[in-house]
Amino acid sequence: MKHIRRTPPHFFRPLLQAIENWLQEKSSSQEPVRLHVALSYFNSSSTKLLFELFECLNGFARRGVPCELHWYFDAEDDISEEFGQELCVDFPSLTVFLIADLDAC
């Protein structure tokens, strides 16, 4: 999906709700949840909502549901790479994969 709106909540809220509902249904499965994220642009508003999503996944991982976050970034984008590195620290129950190829997703 491509998102360039100036109002990230309109994009992210329905997506976050759908993922939360899906995770509730999946909570008894031991099959890993794999989320692949490739963003060419994000801002502070998007970051806040992404953190809500990742915290939701982190919570499921803490309860024993294996969760993977595949973070794709442009190899020349230091900010996106550093953001991915921070995800490893901020969400320790997630298995985070940093992939320096935005087009690989």
Image (cartoon, rainbow, N blue to C red):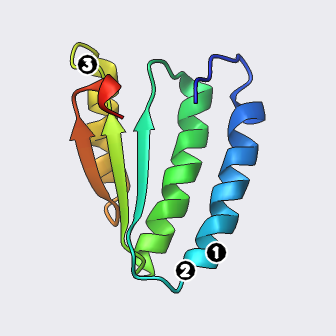
Query: Considering only vertical position in the picture, is 95 above or below 46?
Result: below
Spatial CA distance of label 2 from label 1 is 5 Å
| Disc 3 residue crowd, few under 14, some 14–19, many 20+, Cα 10 Å | few
Helix, strand or loop for disc 3: helix
Horizontal side, residue 30 vs residue 55: left or right: left
Could you say which disc has been placed on residue 24 in the image?
1
Spatial CA distance of label 1 from label 3 is 35 Å
Report the residue marked by disc 2.
27
From the viewer's side, name the closer residue of 73 and 31. Answer: 31
- The answer to which of marks 2 and 3 sits earlier in the sequence is 2
| Image quadrant assignment for residue 63 | bottom left
Spatial CA distance of label 2 from label 3 is 35 Å
| Disc 2 residue crowd, few under 14, some 14–19, many 20+, Cα 10 Å | some
Report the residue marked by disc 3.
78
Horizontal side, residue 19 vs residue 59: left or right: right
Which residue type does callout 2 highlight? Ser
Helix, strand or loop for disc 1: helix
